[in-house]
Image (cartoon, rainbow, N blue to C red):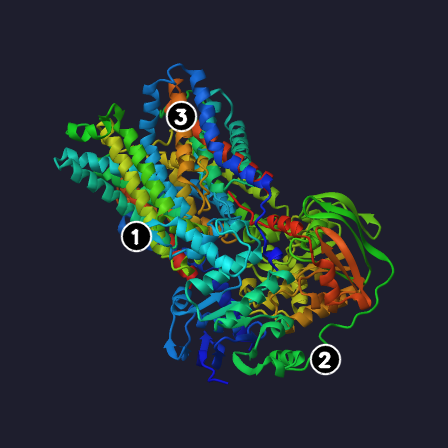
Amino acid sequence: MTVDANALEIRGISKSFGANKVLVDLNLTLKKGEVHALMGENGAGKSTLIKIISGVHHADSGAIFLDGKSVKFHSPFEAQVGGVATLFQEIQEIPDLTVAENLYAGIEPTKYGVFIDWKSLHNNAQLQIDELGLNIDASQKMRKLTPSSRKMVEIIRAVHKRAASVVIMDEPTANLNQGEIDALFTLIDELKRKGISIIYVSHRIREIFQIADRISVLRDGCLVKTESVGRIKEDEIVRLMVGRDLPEFYPRREPPTETVSLDVRGLAVDGELDDVTFDVKSREIVGIAGLEGSGASSVIKALFGLKQVALGSVEIDGKRLVITSPKHSIAQGLAYVPEDRKADGLFLNKTVSFNLTASVLKSHFSWHGLIVRKRLAQVASENVIKRLGIKLSGPFAKIGSLSGGNQQKSLFGRWLIGSYKVLLLEEPTRGVDIGAKLEIYEEISSLAKSGLPVLLYSSELLELIGMCDRVIVMKNGRVSGILSGEELTEENILDKALIRDNRAIGHQAMTQPIPSSV
Amino acid sequence: MQKSNAQTTIYSWLNEYRSEFTLVILIALTFTIGPLLTEYFFTLDNLFNLSRQSSYLAIVTTGMALVLIIGGIDLSVGAIMQLVGLCTVLILGSGVSAGVALVLALLLGAGLGVVNGLLTVYARMQPFIATLATGGIMTGVVMTYTQGNAVAPKGIDPTFRAIGGGTVAGIPIPALTMMLVVLVFWWVMSKTVYGKNIYALGSNKLAARNVGINTKQIECSVYILSGILAALAGYLTFARSGSFQPATAATGGTSVEMVIMAIAAIVLGGGSLAGGKGTIVGAFLGALVSAIMLNFLVLLGMGIWFQRFILAVIIVIVVVSARKTEGT
Amino acid sequence: MHTILSNKKPGSRVTNKFAFAEYMPLFVVLFLFIVGSLSSDRFIQVNNILNIFQYAAEPAIIAIGMMFVVLGRGIDLSVGSVMGIGNVTAALLVAAGYPVWLSIVGAILFGAMIGLINGILVTRGKMEPIIATLATMIGARSVIYFMTNGAPLFEGIPEEFKVIAQGYIFGVPNGVLFLVIAFAGAFIILGHTRYGRHIYAVGGSEETAGLFGIKVTWIKTSTYVISGMLAATAGVIGASRLGIGDPNAGVGYELIAITMIVVGGVRLAGGVGTVFGVFSGVLIVSILTNILQLDNVSTHAQHIFLGVALIGMMLFLSWKDVTEA
């Protein structure tokens, strides 16, 4: 074997925010042409490390060597010019410009040094795309592409336009479905062949075993271990991340009763859902799976009153549910945890107890629905905070300043005050560290045990399999199968979820544009 | 251990309400320095004047504060004051009593607020463009009707002028009204479910909807309240002279000024145009400080245009420094 | 794998609707022409049509400046006052005997300076554009009153200054020429230069534009400077057209300019809007104003119609959004 040159070398990086030491004397090497996975709980220091490499933050001490030369970037743009491209979690794009313009933004070819040379701009861009065998029209506006295509365009820009030698990907698959993830992995293989090195950050262990060459685990700002993929096992990684042994990842379940609690028949939403029929028994956890655009993520929203329901009947404990608005749904006993906690769930600049009591203020903690009974609300929220172990930094601490895990627990804890008949959960553990994940699983399971039917939508198949008694698989807006017991495997879910008809996909892609606003 | 806990609690309390404390200190300072600069400052005459001026502003500011808390903006409040003032004077001219005129004025303000609310909430227009347009229409109506001239009908109910210029227990009626308005809305915003829901909505509209708050209803109601309070301010403003004087370009477009002073007062009091932040007390203190500043400029013999210039500069300083402290 | 990435088959229904929305302003212009000729026989005369274009020049130039700012996700409410600054500065300078070209340059530079202040307040001072430009709107207007003591300036304005806006080239009023130059310039800059496209990028997403290596602060500041220069230019044209330095010039023009660009399909949230659209917006508002003038509706009442037109357009746009969603 020839000498393995290091593409990137990190020596003794330390970083503190105030008194909080985020990275402590961290060393890491990235070989040429390898995919190096970075793992660790939230707060372990992964994202700070990435931000230091890409020039968003600056290290307090230590040095970074790129191709053997010491470098110090002051902005992500500078890093990109220097050969380090970073794909942050959010897609970096200008939605209303074309794909070609996005690819060439800032380095547009010009005529006479002034006017943009549209022809070579579009031709070059299309060439770049075709080279990778992608089916994207360079003159199309970004807004009209599927999320995966947009991610691909971003990757092309990052990799090819600036001649990157190192590419950092932060949770690139967060919003992608299985097919799209496969496409991304094909592209990563291609990059590897070209000698480009990749730092790959993800919470999804299975994915990492599929794509990575080496794995580094971070804990509390220190590098715990770097190991080749072949020499390490899944549970060892989890143990390294958490720093303790995990007795059992998913809580033990008790068999559900036979009483049907939630009965959904022929639910239809224009252009999204058609004839969706299923039931959830008391004490049962039912999962919903499906690719992006399959309607899986719409089922819960439709039940909660966030979609215009065209047809169908829903009964809770034999009583018909009237779906008009979230307000009305809550009043009829539905509790809902939305998938995007920052956008749809939390009041970020308010305190935890404001967040915990917002939904029940009128019904539980007020005098005739008018005047707030502050003391009662305070006591109730303190109980929830204690029960879920939410960590606060002070009496006026805003929820936005807490860690992802504490935020998600608070979002969940909102429904522990008051009594509800059905629990609707969307991605209850997205972007949450393993410790908090386990606590949330435990809480969901104990709520189910107490008799509450739970409907759980998740894009993590392992979570569905681990948590649910049954999983409903969606395809093209319809239920394509309900799996339980032995049949409940990743392979079976994917088999039911995948669409093999090209036309249907084309249509599906078009239903996903970013909504434009005036 | 106990003690340090109490200390941190007090510290975070001070930190939470730092804009309010700063303003209180600022007001105390002006009241100590004021008499040194001009002896006229502490005369009864001037204090009456000051209290009246600050009352119009503080009432409008209270309404605007609600709108800013939900992340909206109401650029039509000045125009509402104008239109309501004109209509009030006209109604009074037809022989109606001052009390009935007040009710009609508030109803008109509510109606104009409904229009703003419908346009922003149900037609989903950006609040600033909707209220810019409705304000423009209202100003157009006022100017078309008056052609820029004062409207002073004869024989209107003398109570009207008494409300504008009179006192109860030695305090000018507009100032009393202001105190009442501020008290009521402080109570509403800090003690009622409605107030908490307004904060929730301003902090995150989608989240508010998902916890079962009827966001549209609340948003609309806030624009209505802003309209009613602007109408009240308009009524009081023209009750002073008992006649209507349109705000023309020559007099500086007072309607725009009222808007920006109200916004400046709120930012001064710790509010933000991004929504979800700010308190009624903060907005009130901010309005008070703005009014005192203007009063000083008048007392120091500055011309009206110089006052306006200083006003613009002060607004810039206030907002920029608010941004800078937010950033840290 | 490729099938999953496919996006090449946009639904034809959607495409048609977008095209309809894009040509909507054109239909409105046509409709207004019909309304105009029905309401007054003076409407469809060559003179009147030239009139429309000539009077459109000043608001149109301001609207173009506003368009630059709004595309970069800002708003400039100070344009009316800056127009007044340009107007009064040029009039004062020519009346004081300075050469015409120098006076014009002076006026435009003054406008650029206020634009620069706006830009710095928004980018460096992190002020919301609405507040920053409202403050400069008040500040600039008070400066005008310092300069003039509030009185219009009638005397000492030379013919060679008046001829700029009052003159004709080949029988076409100069104002029409200014209009054409302004739109041609905007078309080239916004549609075909890197600078112009970067304004769209910044308006689309500041963060991403920064990551793409676009100098966001510089771009944003420059749009305010352009807006200030164009507003002052419109003021100069106004002073020349009437031969008066008018301290009240430009009052209410922010509403007119915003109406024009919104009617022309510029998105107030930034990043979307075409020069062709703004041109249609200018035409629609100008024709509407002309019809009202021919029907002897007063200026103030015209503002009422403008407000209604603005609301109407926004209602149409949000309705379009709802139906397309």
The CA span between labels 2 and 3 is 77 Å
Q: Mark 1 lies on which chain?
A: A
Q: In this view, does A194 lie above or below C289?
A: below
Circle 3 is placed at which residue position? Answer: C287
* Disc 2 versus disc 3: nearer the observer: 3
- SS class of the residue under badge 1? loop
Mark whose residue sits in front, 2 or 1: 1
Mark identifier at residue A247: 2
Q: Hey, what amino acid is under mark 1? A: Gly
In the picture, the quarter occupied by the C terminus of chain B is bottom left
* Residue hosting label 1: A113
What residue sits 66% from the left and 54% below the top?
A361
Q: Is mark 3 on a helix, strand or loop?
A: helix
Crowd tier of the residue under label 1, counting other residues whose Cα lies within 10 Å: few below 14, some 14–19, many 20 or above:
few
Residues tagged by mark 2 and mark 1 found on one chain of the structure: yes
Identify residue type, mark 3.
Answer: Ile
Q: Is residue A221 above or below residue A490?
A: below
C-beta proximity under 8 Å, tags 1 and 3? no
